[in-house]
Image (cartoon, rainbow, N blue to C red):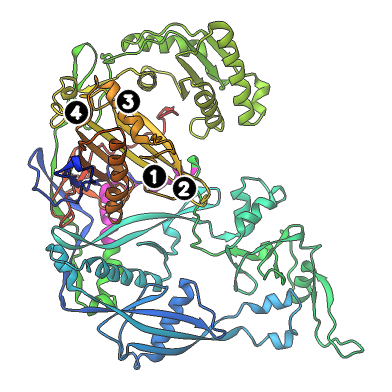
Amino acid sequence: MEENRNLPHPVPTPNLPPNSKPERMDFPKYSIIGRPGIGRAGRPINLLTNHFKVSVNVPDAVFYQYSVSLTSEDKRAVEGKGIGRKLIDKLYQTYSSELAGKKFAYDGEKTLYTVGPLPQNELEFTVVLEDTFAKRESENLRGGESSSKRSKRSFQSRTFNVEISYAAKVPLKSILLGLKGRDKENNAQDALRVLDIALRQTAAKRGCLLVRQSFFHDDLSNFTDVGGGVTGVKGFHASFCPTKGGLSLNMDVSTTMILKPGSVIDFLVVNQNVSESRYLDWAKAKRMLKNLRVKTTHRNMEYKIVGLSEKPCNQQFFSMKPRNRKGQDEEEQTVDITVCEYFIKHHGIELRDSACLPCLDVGKPNRPNYLPLELCSLVSLQRYTKALSSMQRASLVEKSRQKPPERMRTIVDALRKYRYDEDPVLAECGISLEKQLTQVEGRVLESPKLKVGNGYDCIPRNGRWNYNQRTLLQPFNIKRWAIVNFSARCDTSRLSREFIDCGRKKGVQIERPDLVIEEDSQMRRENPVRRAERMSKRVFETIENKFKCKPDLVLCVLAERKNSDIYGPWKKICLSDFGVVTQCISPFKINDQYLTNVLLKVNSKLGGINSLLAMEHSSSVPIIKDTPTMILGMDVSHGSPGRSDMPSIAAVVGSRCWPLISRYRASVRTQSPKMEMIDALFKPLANGDDDGIMRELLIDFYRSSNGRKPTQIIIFRDGVGESQFNQVLGIELEQIVKAYQNMGETRIPKFTVIVGQKNHHTKLFQANSPENVPPGTVVDSMIVHPRNYDFYMCAHAGMIVSKEHHCCLDC
């Protein structure tokens, strides 16, 4: 999301020794190892990082944890962080003396902390809140009391009961003990949580939107429109973290998505990409608006949307009780009136833009409360949690990019502006912050040499290399292939000629295409799935009749560069239904550089090898060259935000053809939604067989490595946090061992698990240069974990892709 793309990755690497007696078939006992030392390879580099040193001037301070129970007058539990914070603030204002003046660190839910104890372990208070009362309009629009009684009721008092009970002590010194490795009771994380809660509380009092440890101010200068009624808002992440150099505050720029505040009608028009409100899809609008908060312009009151009216404002009737009108039985009568008529008669407002549009319903299930759309505006800082489109993502990246000096300046200015160490709870325990970035020493590793075709070496420069005047190491010759063209502007004859010529230069022999199929112009009006189905039917029927066998490749030309609707259906049909390798492209212009990039993808997909590490080519990779070693890469992908019903996808790749380390086989399984631990590594069947991932990969390793079995396995695990390390060891690693044993093996391999973490907020900057840190930068001191064996690595160059960059759609 910013120009400083080469974000460092902390890599905790627990080394896992085998059981000393594997023949007993017992499971090994694994543990997370400490740091064996500091690396020395590479040239030194002076760096700055967005960690700010923290001093603890009252180390003997003790946090007292209390459980909080909030109930209303009718004994119902109060839920919602917003009202919880209001109640605790009012409690402190009202009963400060009874609480001995103790300041609170409140998490917004059921826990608060104080420095030192409260006067009693069990306390109970009655708290009265006066909130803006949004009932005035609602009773008008659903037949409430007369307007003479309503006119004086713009506020309402509500009474709540607050119970506070002692739960535990959290000594601040546990953080200092943890830094030294002497926190036997593991209280350091609890104490750090208290400090982070104090940070969040400070931000909440300033009216910020809170997203975990990030906070976002309602400031238009921080807003970035990304299209579709969605706005990116820039804020800051702040959290305390233990490091080898001591306690530090990690602060970074952060971005989240919100709905664009302002007119509801304008939002819907932009969200649905229509020209006028009369073209809106109201079923879609209802789903989009549900549970959003709006503020009315005529009364400045806030409501939550529950739905839309069935009819437009000028036809939607409701019953109301007119002033001083009674029937013969002395009971109040009601009259039916439209929403439009009501606002003309009672507010002097003639609806112009929304008279023929549905109303917002902000009432209750059986008591609707209607508001015209044109009188409502979306409240600011309402999160948008759905997945962004490719166009929205591109817009966000482009608009939120920052150069390293600008990012450093933004972070330091924010720290000085928000003055965290002046928070009452933090100040009471003597927390103070340095106001400058931490200096740290790093190392830049030497770029590894690559081996390409004809025995030539290739040495990357600044993390990049090219194939100018070079050939591929092991090219795959393409004998039968086809071109499918969905784009009216592409000259397929020229494309095939230049693709063949590019292949010849890189050592790939490509025959002329056996089939070129152009999409009919009339078909382009149909939906993407139908277009893909019709084209695939033409292609594969022709291929079957002509060749009686599958082609090596189908090259597909798409019209759209990044958001093609045909891409998904086409890939599914070709790969799943027909099992044919495809390459989708959308060339802005065809040149040698673009076609070379395409050729590299195609050669890899067909089983060729573009290049190898020089040490791999000569079978001299340390640790691996003499010992049959299998390398696993494991990750789990989850459904898009808001799609809790989508299954998670577990994927594992396993190396093959030992002693090579760049040839892999993939295995994929579905599992329960949002489940991070992979549960199909070992999957025993009723007949005793194993249908798990590991059996599949182990057999492939054995067959491709001349009958060698792995005696050591290196696992690269992505997507897990520090709190899940033991689950990786206890759940996933145990399954791998069971799969190995299920194949009749008694000697369990040695294991090393390396966890790669990308979703963190540590950034590295060059101390004496405005450029990004160079690729190969490593930091294993000062800001690393005080106990675990981890390090930060920027493996890639931080490059910006120009707007003219050609788009090659396949991975």
The amino acid pointed to by label 2 is: Ser
Please tell me which residue is depicted at 62% across the width and 69% down the height of the picture.
296
Can I make out residue 355 in this image? no
Mark 1–mark 4 Cα distance, whole angstroms, equals: 26 Å
Q: Secondary structure at mark 1?
A: loop
Count residues near mark 4 (Cα–Cα under 10 Å), then give few for <14, some for 14-19, many for 20+: many
C-beta proximity under 8 Å, tags 3 and 1: no
Of the numbered discs 2 and 4, the one sitting upstream in the chain is: 4
* Marker disc for residue 628: 4
Q: Is residue 69 above or below residue 482?
A: below
Sequence-wise first label, 3 or 1: 1
Q: Amino acid at mark 1?
A: Asp
Label for residue 700? Answer: 3
Mark 2 or 1: the one toward you: 1
Which one is nearer the viewer's eye here, 509 or 140? 509
User: How far separated are the C-alphas under marks 3 and 1?
Assistant: 20 Å
Horizontal side of 516 relative to 357 (left or right) equals left
- Other-residue count near label 3 (Cα within 10 Å), few / some / many at <14 / 14–19 / ≥20: some
In the image, residue 574 above or below residue 82? above
Looking at the rendered structure, the secondary structure element under dot 3 is helix
Q: Which residues are magenta?
A: 392-413
Query: The residue under label 3 is which amino acid type?
Result: Asp
Instruction: Report, in whole angstroms, how far the alpha carbon at label 4 lies from the one at label 3.
Output: 14 Å
Quadrant containing the C terminus is: top left
How many discs mark residues in the rendered view?
4
Task: Name the residue that disc number 1 marks.
Answer: 679
Task: First in sequence, mark 1 or 4: give its number.
Answer: 4
Rendered image: mark on residue 672? 2
Answer with the quarter of the image where residue 6 lies: top left
